[in-house]
Image (cartoon, grey):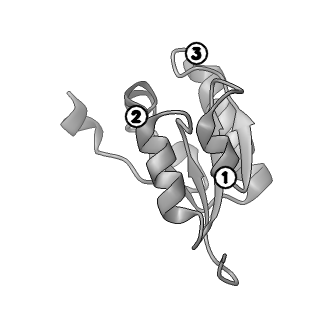
């Protein structure tokens, strides 16, 4: 059951084990929107809403896709779960209206 006035959380990499686990952990308490590059992402089945996004190696398109979703869905928190996406998003917390939950860039080098 989603609480009244609860957070809306964006989880990336909905097809991978970390993404699926994160979605399952959060979905009963928060509104979960997920993303993946594949329309066959298993995590989509457990999300309240989902989107197919550009791959992280298409950095500009990937970031723009996420920014559009953040705006459209009123996202409060972004939790990336894919190494390539974490690398692209690290150090870019100022690009999003939502809080990006991520390791500092210096910890990834």
User: Dividing the image into 4 quarters, which one contains the C terminus?
Assistant: top left
| Mark 3 or 1, nearer chain start | 1
Judging by the rendered image, the residue that carries numbered circle 3 is 58
Query: In what element is the residue under mark 3?
Result: loop
Mark 2 or mark 1: whose residue is earlier in sequence: 1
Closest to the camera, between mark 2 and mark 1, is 1
Q: Which mark, by number, is residue 95?
A: none
Q: Nearer the N terminus, badge 3 or badge 2?
A: 3
Report, in whole angstroms, how far the alpha carbon at label 3 lies from the one at label 1.
Answer: 24 Å
Work out which residue is located at the far top of the displayed protein and give it: 57
The structure residue drawn at horizontal position 75% and vertical position 55%, both measured from the top left corner, is 73
Image coordinates of residue 80 in percent, x first then y, are 46, 42
State if disc 2 and disc 3 touch (CB < 8 Å).
Answer: no
Q: Is residue 63 visible?
A: yes
Alpha carbon distance from label 2 to label 1: 20 Å
Mark 3 and mark 1 in contact? Answer it, CB < 8 Å.
no
Q: Extreme right residue here?
A: 72
- The numbered mark at residue 86 is 2
Q: Is residue 31 above or below residue 92?
A: below
Q: Residue at x 67, y 31 (%)?
A: 64
Depth check, front residue: 108 or 24? 24
Q: Front-most of 17 and 76? A: 17
Which residue sits furthest bottom? 4
Q: Label 2's element?
A: helix
Q: How many marks?
A: 3
Residue designated by label 1? 47
Please provide percent x and percent y for residue 20. 50, 45
In the foreground, 36 or 85: 36
Determine contact: label 2, label 1, CB under 8 Å. no
Image: 68 above or below 47: above
Which residue appears at 44% of the width and 28% of the height? 88
């Amino acid at each position: 059951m989603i609480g009244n006035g609860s957070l809306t959380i964006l989880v990336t990499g909905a097809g991978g084990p970390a993404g699926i686990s994160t979605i399952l952990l959060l979905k009963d308490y928060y509104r979960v929107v997920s993303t993946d590059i594949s329309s066959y992402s298993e995590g989509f089945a457990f999300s309240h809403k989902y989107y197919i996004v550009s791959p992280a190696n298409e950095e500009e398109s990937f970031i723009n896709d996420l920014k559009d979703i953040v705006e459209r869905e009123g996202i409060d928190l972004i939790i990336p779960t894919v190494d390539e996406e974490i690398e692209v998003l690290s150090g870019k917390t100022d690009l999003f209206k939502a809080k990006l939950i991520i390791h500092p860039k210096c910890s990834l080098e």
